[in-house]
Amino acid sequence: QVQLVESGGGLVQAGDSLRLSCIASGRTDSIYGMAWFRQAPGKEREFVAAHSWSSSLTYYADTVKGRFTISRDNAKNTQYLQMNNLKPEDTSVYYCAARRTLANYAKSMNYAYWGQGTQVTVSS
């Protein structure tokens, strides 16, 4: 089992920045890749960004490309999401997720482990 704990959410104004963190514990050697998803009220959970644990490849949703940056510190079993130039439409609960296999990184069904989520609210 892998446990994921997010932190770093909050209330900010449009144009501000936030950095989310996600610490993984437990069987972290079973992790192939990790990602961030988000879910706004009344909407489906959507892909934000992803990377594999052992390569430098990163992937982003078009809606956040150029504003968000996913990164990791393998020694700390921690991934981050740096969010710049935040917009009101970025308001969501952000979830950290981990997958065990090489699978479609943008599909939430391919992730076996999830954090509890952290709220990000962007006011206009």
Image (tube, grey):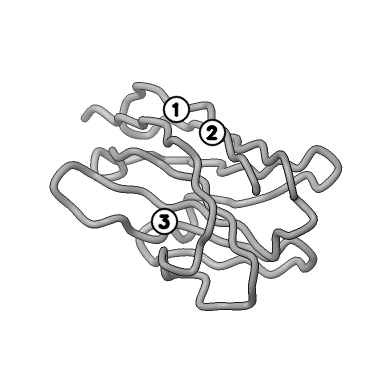
Pointer 1 and pointer 2: residues touching (CB < 8 Å)? yes
> What residue sits right under mark 3 in the picture?
64
User: Mark 2: which secondary structure?
Assistant: strand
User: Mark 1: which secondary structure?
Assistant: loop
Which image quadrant for residue 80? top right
Residue found 54% across the figure and 52% down from its top: 113
> What residue sits right under mark 1 in the picture?
9
Tell me the CA gap for discs 1 and 3.
Answer: 17 Å
Mark whose residue sits in front, 1 or 2: 2
Q: Is residue 41 left or right of residue 37?
A: left
Residue found 40% across the figure and 61% down from its top: 47
Of mark 3 and mark 2, the one earlier in the sequence is 2
Asked if 10 appears above or below 58 in the picture, the reply is above
Task: Kindly identify the amino acid type of the residue bearing the numbered disc 2.
Answer: Glu
Instruction: Give the mark count.
Output: 3
Residue found 72% across the figure and 48% down from its top: 72
What x and y, as percent, mark residue 78? Answer: 71, 41
Of mark 1 and mark 3, the one earlier in the sequence is 1
Tell me the CA gap for discs 3 and 2.
Answer: 19 Å
Tell me the CA gap for discs 1 and 2.
Answer: 8 Å
Q: Is residue 46 left or right of residue 4?
A: left
> What residue sits right under mark 2 in the picture?
6
Which image quadrant for residue 124? top left
Residue with the most extreme bottom position: 103
Residue with the most extreme right position: 75
Pointer 3 and pointer 2: residues touching (CB < 8 Å)? no
Task: Kindly identify the amino acid type of the residue bearing the numbered disc 3.
Answer: Val
